[in-house]
Amino acid sequence: MPHDANGLLGALGLCRKAGKLLHGYDRVEEAVIRGKVSLVLLACDASPRTKQHMQDTCEGLVACEVMPLETASLAALTPRPAAVFAVTDDNLARLCANQLTR
C-alpha cells in the first residue's frame, strides 16, 4: 500500500467511526440519488462496469473518485467486502478528497 494511502485509510476510518461512511453499490447509489452524499469513492480494483455505472449515477450530482486502495485493504472498514463507498459529511468528504490529492 502506498504511503499516501495510509492517510486516506485513516480518514475513511474516521468517517466510519463518525457514522458518515456508507458502503455497497446499492446503498451508495440510493443515497446519491437522494442527495445525501458528499463524495463517492471507488476501490481501484472495482470492476470496470461498477466504476462506469457509479460514475454515470454521480455525474452532475457528486464527485466520484477512484481510490489508490484495493478492496482487500478496505476490508477492515466494513463487515463484508465492498468496492463502493460514500461519505455523507461535507467536512469529512473534504478530508478524504485532500488525502486523495497527496
Image (cartoon, rainbow, N blue to C red):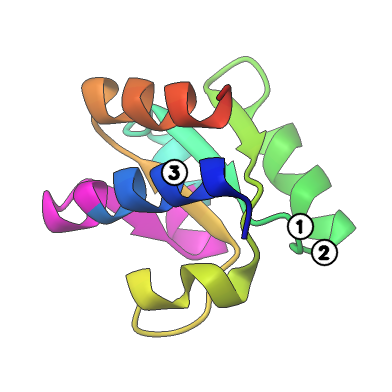
* Left or right of 20 in this view: 79: right
In the displayed structure, 73 sits above or below 43; it is: below
Mark positioned earlier in the residue sequence (3 or 1): 3
- 10 Å crowding of disc 1: few (<14), some (14-19), many (20+): some
Numbered badge on residue 100: none
Q: In the rendered structure, are the residues bearing label 2 and label 1 in contact, judged by CB atoms less than 8 Å apart?
A: yes
The kind of secondary structure element at disc 3 is helix
**Circle 3 or circle 1, nearest the eye:** 3
Residue 96 location, quadrant = top left
Q: Residue furthest right?
A: 48
Q: Residue furthest top?
A: 60
- Residue 45 against residue 102 in the figure, above or below: below
Label 2: which residue?
A: 47
Q: In the image, residue 30 lies at what x, y percent?
A: 45, 49
Q: Quadrant of the C terminus?
A: top right
- Which one is in front, 56 or 4? 4
Q: CA distance from mark 2 to mark 3?
A: 21 Å
- Cα separation, mark 2 vs mark 1, equals 5 Å
- Percent from the top left, x then y, of residue 60? 63, 15
Q: What is the magenta range?
A: 14-28
Q: Label 3, on which residue?
A: 8
Instruction: Say few, some or many: other residues with alpha carbon within 10 Å of mark 3 (under 14 / 14 to 19 / 20 or more).
Output: many
Q: Which residue is mark 1?
A: 50
Q: Amino acid at mark 1?
A: Thr
Q: Which of the two residues, 92 or 50, is positioned nearer the viewer here?
A: 92
